[in-house]
Amino acid sequence: MDRRHFLGKAAAVAAGLAAAPSVLAEEVKAGVILPGAVPTDGKAGEVSTGVEDHLKVSGYVKEKAHRIPVVAEVDVVVAGGGSAGVSAAVCAARQGASVILIEKANFLGGLWTGGLVLPVLATHGKGQTQAWDKATHGFCEEVCDILLQNGWAIDPLNPRVEPEAAKYLLDKKLVDAGVVTLYNSTVCGVTMHGDKIESVLVDCNTGRIAIKCAMAVDATGDGLLFSYAGDPYEARRYHMNTSYRIAGISAETRFGRPTPIPGMRVTGHGGREAMDGLDVFKVSAKQQRDRLEIWDKMEQKKKEPGFENMYLVELGPVTGVRVTRVLDSLHNVTLEESMEWTRFDDVIGMSGVCDPFTYKGRRITKKDRPVWQIPYRSLIPRETRNLLVAGRCFGYDQGITWDAREISTCMVTGEAAGTAAALSVKAGCAAKDLDVQRLQHTLRQNKVRLDF
Ligand SMILES: Cc1cc2nc3c(=O)[nH]c(=O)nc-3n(C[C@H](O)[C@H](O)[C@H](O)COP(=O)(O)OP(=O)(O)OC[C@H]3O[C@@H](n4cnc5c(N)ncnc54)[C@H](O)[C@@H]3O)c2cc1C
């Protein structure tokens, strides 16, 4: 197979870590970059996800060449209907673009709703003018406000949502914006025309279909579109957990965290071992082990007073993989930039913060961590001209993984990517050539906060 290795920044960082762990790596709560270079198949139009980097391959088979029917042509295809993808699709459609959203599950929200990771974190951080400042406005705030006002979420600072209500609301937002949503449809490749994605390939029970697009947004969480298109990325490891909901316990007992449904709690299970979320064998085995262990744990717990009537409501149907492929973008946001009030000319939104950590040898509490700006370039791949990336796989350094992949930040990047995709279609330009001031003007009109 013709393989091209990207020995750019990603590989350099990875190689550096392998030789002598940097301070940065130690600061990260969990997770390491996979050792060695991170190759992708850079050949335009070839479909590959660099399987050899994650699984032992014993040989190859060849699929028969076949024509794939084009069933739709739209301005913008959004791959993935998680918190980032829905934000992107709604915001692109609100700018007048025709949009198709492709989602492999039969519901929206991805990890947020399906993974039962219910609290919307990283909404706030230390402000320059205010001690504790809200960073995430725009579409994220719009959605959270509705959830809170209807009693579908608790805790105004970091709304912990009722997942079925969030699924309902996300569907409603897509319908109202005129987005066509394809469920049970898995993005399985792209066709390229030069350095542009010509069509996104989708496997569904009808068969394999192609959707032509002027622009695409990768919101798959796993960076599938940019990996199919051949853009460089880092493959990262992180620990994986399974969240589950329980009920039937007495109010005095402490187990899990409250949810908007009285008497129902949510909690998590699993260790802190960094895992390769792209190794389907290991991830599947871990998911299976978690299910068995949670059941056994529940059976034991039921023997304790107050837990006799406890029952398992559900395990999150989406497996709790935190980070896999992360784009090597035109500018990957760094930990330093997030800590030093860095201003970007091409800012498209802000992130709040999540946890305390050690920075330059000093313990920094959550309350002392500043809100930080997200540059437009961190959503743009190095090679593909009509692709933008949103959600947990946009371009950021390992050191800020904890903030960058939280739901509110995913929604902020989704809103910017969707808006930029629609404006690029209107302007007839590549994502990187878009007039950034026009993008910022539109985002501000939609109440997105851009400055400290
Ligand atoms: C265990 C755990 C706990 C967490 N806790 C919190 C928390 O408390 N608060 C917080 O804010 N964040 C938390 N996070 C992080 C946060 O939930 C995620 O980073 C965020 O929800 C990611 O959103 P996303 O839209 O980028 O990706 P996802 O939510 O992963 O959405 C991606 C979507 O794309 C779809 N998709 C994937 N591949 C394809 C394909 N080939 N074709 C079509 N569709 C596809 C998926 O089905 C999914 O719907 C947690 C994460 C984990 C794993």
Image (tube, rainbow, N blue to C red):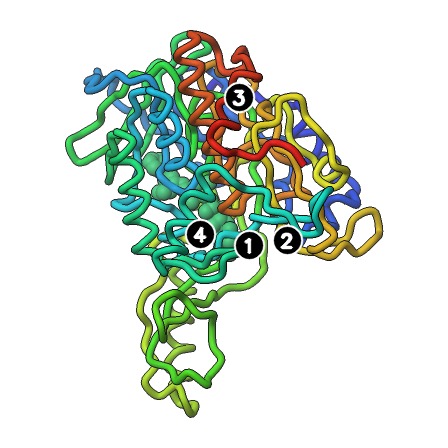
Q: Which residue is mark 1?
A: 239
Horizontal and vertical percent for residue 425?
Answer: 39, 13
In-front residue for pair 149/4: 149
Q: Which residue is mark 3?
A: 441
Q: Which mark is residue 30?
A: 2
In-front residue for pair 39/28: 28
Looking at the figure, which quarter contains the C terminus? top right
Q: Amino acid at mark 4?
A: Val
Q: Residue at x 43, y 20 (%)?
A: 421
Query: What whole-number distance in Å separates the C-alpha atoms at marks 1 and 2?
Result: 7 Å
Q: Are marks 1 and 2 in contact (CB under 8 Å)?
A: yes
Q: Is residue 214 above or below residue 393?
A: above
Secondary structure beneath label 3: helix
Which image quarter: residue 329?
Answer: top right
Q: Residue at x 66, y 38 (%)?
A: 372
Going from N to C along the chain, the mark reached first, 3 or 4, is 4
